[in-house]
């Protein structure tokens, strides 16, 4: 009796288990299909190029509903028979050797529109049996367009910045020349006239003589200022004597005016440095010294220019309060941005580091011909 009952119980248990298994299989199938539909990329399963399953996202990507696609040849997604053949060849030859791959190809939507898709494909199972594979299609047309637009606008900005820099240099040179020709010549004439007056004045006119001496002093001081303004606008030294002399002059000038000791250690051969690059280095040096004078509270600054095989390195370190990271990366730091832009035009890099109370160091590195030629 007990044995009979156990038999019935076993049957019942088996039945329950089978039911549970069947339910679980159904549940798993439902889960799989909801996972497929939760994925935003179009997914299709292929068997010998025929679409055997597809998720809902195929509608967004290609405009076809999944029902329309089942049983169709995957050629339906491509722009031409030829392209379709090429893609299929690529797919199957790649998946023979590797389990998955990612690549980009052009596809066609139901409405005839071309789209660029990033495709990921994987074979179903260990081997490429009966050409059974799964492919996901991500429409990256807009993303790629946005990337290209961004690249284009960056390029435009870079060109604009190069244009502005060069226009500024040209304008400075023009103003410097005009001041030199107009003001410089008149001042020299005035200086000669005042000196002539001093010589012509008969003895005994002490008051006139004093006045003439004061005028002489004033005219000389004005000539000096005009020279300084001209040289800062467009360092004639840079054109005539080269970068090293111009930097030395600027350092001397800076030291006299600010009272901050300025040491320079220049280790380069002027004749090997491109003229426009020399202007860039000089302007960076000027802007950095101006910052030292205005913001650092330093008592000394040290500049080193080193020419190595493939790069030029300019390092300017002060012993002031130290710049903060926030100041370096602030979008309002236009002076620093200007340095970065000048350096970028030469494919170079710039680093600014500050240590609180211990100073700021600006380093720029420019690759020299062979590596990063100027644009
Ligand atoms: N050597 C330095 N030591 C300490 N702080 C500095 C130094 N150089 C720059 N800074 C800080 O970084 C900020 C940004 O410098 P940046 O040259 O970009 O602008 P700016 O000198 O204030 O103005 P601009 O150069 O446009 O006339 C400065 O305002 C200053 O606070
Ligand atoms: Mg500045």
Image: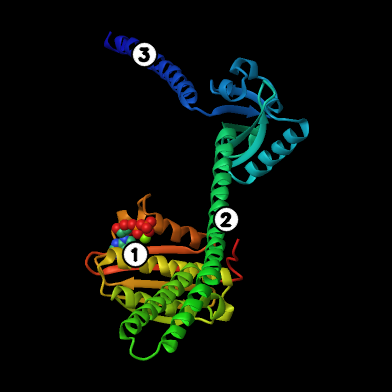
- The quarter holding residue 327 reads bottom left
Q: Are marks 2 and 1 in contact (CB under 8 Å)?
A: no
Q: Are marks 2 and 3 in contact (CB under 8 Å)?
A: no
Model colouring: rainbow
Q: Earlier in the sequence, mark 2 or mark 1?
A: 2
Residue at position x 30%, y 72% in the image: 318
Q: Earlier in the sequence, mark 1 or mark 3?
A: 3
**Along the line of sight, the residue nearer the viewer: 333 or 153:** 333
Q: Which residue is mark 2?
A: 163
Q: Residues within 10 Å of mark 1 (few under 14, many from 20)?
A: some
How far, Cα to Cα, is label 2 from label 1?
Answer: 24 Å
State yes or no: Cβ of the residue under disc 3 lies below 8 Å from any atom of ligand 1: no
How far, Cα to Cα, is label 2 from label 3?
Answer: 81 Å
The number of callouts visible is: 3
State yes or no: Cβ of the residue under disc 1 lies below 8 Å from any atom of ligand 1: yes
Q: Quadrant of the N terminus?
A: top left
Q: Which residue is mark 3?
A: 16
- The quarter holding residue 198 reads bottom left
Q: Which residue is mark 1?
A: 291
Q: Give SS at disc 2.
A: helix
Relative image position of residue 82 (x, y in whole percent): 77, 34
Does 37 sit above or below residue 297?
above
Relative image position of residue 302 (x, y in whole percent): 34, 77
- The quarter holding residue 43 reads top right
Residue at position x 53%, y 59% in the image: 168
Q: Give SS at disc 1.
A: helix
How far, Cα to Cα, is label 1 from label 3?
Answer: 83 Å
Tell me, yes or no, if residue 100 can be seen here.
no
Relative image position of residue 228 (x, y in whole percent): 43, 73
């Amino acid at each position: 009796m007990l044995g009979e009952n156990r038999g019935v119980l076993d049957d019942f248990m088996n039945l329950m288990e089978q039911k549970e298994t069947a339910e679980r299989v159904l549940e798993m199938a439902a889960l799989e299909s909801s996972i497929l539909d939760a994925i935003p990329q179009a997914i299709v399963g292929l068997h010998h190029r025929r679409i055997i399953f597809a998720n809902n996202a195929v509608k967004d990507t290609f405009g076809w509903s999944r029902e329309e696609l089942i049983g169709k040849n995957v050629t339906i997604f491509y722009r031409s028979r030829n392209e379709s053949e090429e893609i299929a060849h690529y797919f199957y030859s790649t998946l023979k050797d590797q389990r998955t791959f990612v690549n980009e190809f052009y596809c066609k939507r139901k409405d005839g529109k071309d789209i660029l898709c990033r495709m990921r494909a994987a074979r179903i199972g260990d081997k490429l049996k009966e050409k059974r594979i799964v492919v996901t299609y991500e429409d990256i047309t807009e993303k790629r367009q946005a990337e290209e637009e961004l690249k284009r606008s960056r390029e435009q900005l870079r060109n604009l910045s190069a244009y502005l820099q060069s226009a500024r240099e040209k304008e400075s040179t023009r103003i410097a020349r005009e001041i030199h020709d107009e003001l410089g010549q008149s001042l020299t004439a005035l200086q000669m006239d005042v000196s002539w007056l001093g010589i012509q004045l008969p003895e005994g006119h002490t008051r006139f003589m004093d006045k003439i001496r004061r005028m002489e002093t004033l005219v000389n001081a004005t000539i000096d200022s005009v020279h300084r303004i001209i040289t800062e606008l467009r360092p004639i030294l840079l054109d005539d004597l080269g970068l090293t002399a111009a930097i030395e002059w600027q350092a001397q000038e800076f030291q006299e005016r600010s009272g901050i000791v300025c040491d320079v250690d220049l280790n380069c051969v002027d004749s090997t440095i491109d003229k426009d690059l020399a202007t860039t280095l000089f302007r960076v040096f000027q802007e950095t010294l101006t910052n030292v004078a205005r913001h650092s509270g330093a008592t000394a600054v040290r500049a080193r220019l080193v020419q190595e095989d493939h790069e030029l390195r300019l390092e300017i370190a002060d012993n002031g309060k130290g710049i903060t990271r926030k100041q370096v990366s602030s979008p309002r730091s236009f002076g620093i941005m200007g340095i970065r832009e000048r350096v970028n035009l030469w494919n170079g890099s710039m680093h600014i580091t500050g240590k609180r109370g211990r100073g700021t160091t600006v380093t720029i590195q420019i690759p020299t011909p062979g590596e990063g030629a100027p644009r």
